[in-house]
Amino acid sequence: MTETTEVRALEVRGLTAGYGAMAVIHDVTLSVGHGEIVGLLGRNGAGKTTTLMAIAGFLGRCEGEVKVDDVRLRGPAYKRSRGQVGIVLEGRSVFPSLTVANNLELAGADRDEALELFPELRPKLALRAGVLSGGEQQMLALARTVCRHPAVMLIDELSFGLAPTVCERLLARLRHVAETTRVGVLLVEQGIHYAASVADRVLIMNEGLIRAEMPGAELAEREDEIERIYLGGLDDAA
């Protein structure tokens, strides 16, 4: 009998990338299944955002292989984001001078679907995105991406600068989206408790390398181990 291998939403193999002549991440290999949320954790400078940028095609210096639904990605970010990859970067991925309605239209997002996901945006449709609160801007950024129905979403610090209650609401919506649309999500986070609330699996990075992998449900009980990895004490890492 021939074994069948499940096609993953995202597969990354041997990814090495950086800026100029300097490599920041080294031989990164990871995968994300359909409907799965994988958290990428690490302290500042660990290589988390560089990993996302390399996968998305923003970095010119890049070696390794990136596949979405078993199709190898090539070319710069604007080509990848038009296809199967959705990107939400730190700092709100919206156009502040355009209205909420125009932001959705420009992204090619279905307005009704976006408002069903985030009904908080309905009374804001005619407002410029720049006057929204930070949480509302993140809702808009997520809606712009989710409602284009990518196979994979790359999300950088969704919780950045937001109140805990807002973060919890956004992460709950993200969990709902993953389960209902089967999109694969690679989520960069620094907050262990936020990752624990939403991630199926977590990868821990330090110095440009993935040092450990564990189920999201084990994060709380392994927090001391994670802190050692953050600080560079790797001997005890699993």
Image (cartoon, grey):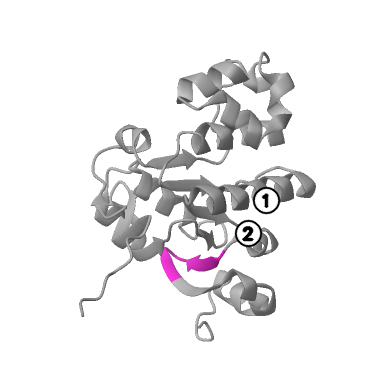
Q: Please indicate, yes or no, whether residue 18 appears anywhere in the rendered image.
A: yes
Whole-percent x, y for residue 37 in the image: 53, 58
Residue 131 location (% of width, % of height):
70, 21
Residue at left offset 67%, top offset 58%: 194
Q: Secondary structure at mark 2?
A: helix
> Is residue 133 visible from the viewing direction of this image?
no
From the viewer's perspective, is residue 208 above or below residue 2? above
Instruction: Verify whether residue 149 appears in magenta.
Output: no
* Residue sitting at the far front: 1
In the image, residue 208 lies in the stretch drawn in magenta: yes
Left or right, 20 with reference to 103:
left
| Label 1, residues with CA under 10 Å away: few <14, some 14-19, many ≥20 | few
Seen as rendered, the residue at the extreme bottom is 236
Which three-letter amino acid code belongs to the residue tagged 1? Ala
Rendered-image quadrant of the N terminus = bottom left
Q: Amino acid at mark 2?
A: Val
The magenta segment is 200-210
Tag 1 residue: 172
Residue at image position (51%, 56%) is 45
- Residue 23 horizontal/vertical position (percent): 33, 56
Q: Residues within 10 Å of mark 2 (few under 14, many from 20)?
A: many
Q: Secondary structure at mark 1?
A: helix
Q: Earlier in the sequence, mark 2 or mark 1?
A: 1
Front position in the image: 138 or 19:
138
Residue where numbered disc 2 is placed: 198
Which percent across, then down, holds residue 136? Answer: 69, 32
Separation of disc 2 and disc 1 at Cα? 7 Å
